[in-house]
Image (cartoon, grey):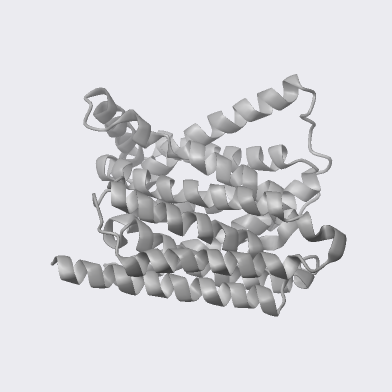
Amino acid sequence: MVALSAGAALLAGALSSVQSRANGQLAQVFGAPADASLWSFGSGWVLLLALVLLVPQVRRGVVEVVRAVRERRLRPWTTVGGILGAAFVAVQTFAVPTIGVALFTIAIVGGQTTSALLVDRLGLGPAGRVHVTAGRVVAALLTFVGVAVAVSARSGSGASAALPVVPVLLAVLAGAGIALQQAINGRVNRVSGSPLATTAINFTWGVGTLLGWALALAVRGGLHPPRTWHAPWWAFLGGFIGIVYIAIGAVVVHHLGVLVAALITLTGQLVSAVVIDLLSPSAQGHVGPQLLLGVGLTLVAALGAGVAAQRARRVAR
């Protein structure tokens, strides 16, 4: 089961990079990150709503979560992971066209691994408190070295040196939120018994959050309809990919723990992100020796944290 969970987490990571590219492409075509974010979450939510209405097991899972909250078996704040997911997609649609999928993913790693340490230490995940060892701390810190190296690869272009700073910082914060989202989704999934029901609850909160953002933009006159709908077919699959990513995350966190699940997922993200940037004519120039060195350091950090976590589990047993 651990091996299957690790493979699923690796697949989820690879799909997440594809989602980053799809949502970034859609933001460029639509001419607005808000429109792309609403499409990504909205299309996924419509599909999940159909599953809730048509599949009894998914519907029972949603009802069970609502009952658990009413009976105080599940704290209400554990059900709002979709807000963090909405923030991630919003940052994704804004940052990826500027800094590329690979650098965006490396920044996500920095935020997610550090946040996962805190989440495990506080016991917010379904496995409860997980001991944080010195090896795991060093591995998490090494991810930020990878971020710094990757960012420096973009800072040698003169006037554009300061360009990536804001999107990179936002990506770090979004990554920190994703680690917390995975932890609380694991708690919700334990009650619902259905990854799709857990994902439906996430998307409902996410759609509500993005609609609030769109309303605020509309009041200020900053919301506009999509400039054009002429985009590659794969650019419209962000919502579907998000469903698969969240559903996998809600299951594997039970078997791997928050930090290890996050690091294996991010390994898949990093490798596929570099491949995607190399295949994209607009992003090929972002991939150079320093960026690849940043990816290598981050992968070493992921491996080190995983080994440290498994060693801590053996000592505990």
Can residue 237 be seen here? The reply is no
Find residue 87 and report its image quarter: top right
Asked whether residue 41 is in view, the answer is: yes
- Please state which of residues 11 and 60 is positioned toward the viewer in this rendering: 11
Quarter of the rendering occupied by the C terminus? bottom left
Q: How many marks?
A: 0
Residue 281 x %, y %? 80, 69
Q: Residue furthest bottom?
A: 289
The answer to which of 111 and 87 lies nearer the viewer is 111
Tell me what residue is drawn at x 48 percent, y 32 percent: 205
In the image, is 291 to the left or to the right of 53? right
Q: Residue 80: give x, y in percent of width and height.
A: 42, 34
212 relative to 139, above or below: above
> Residue at (83%, 43%) from the top-left corner?
228
- Work out which quarter of the rendered image holds the N terminus and state it: bottom left
In which image quadrant can residue 301 be found? bottom left
Tell me where residue 261 appears, x and y as whole percent: 38, 61
Image height check: is 140 above or below 177?
Answer: below
> Which residue, as the protein is rendered here, is positioned at the far right?
159
Q: Position of residue 307 (x, y in %)?
A: 33, 74
Instruction: Tell me the residue at 31%/62% (across/down).
Output: 256
Q: Residue at x 54, y 61 (%)?
A: 15
> Residue lying farthest top?
219
> Considering depth in this image, is 91 or 25 the residue closer to the camera?
91
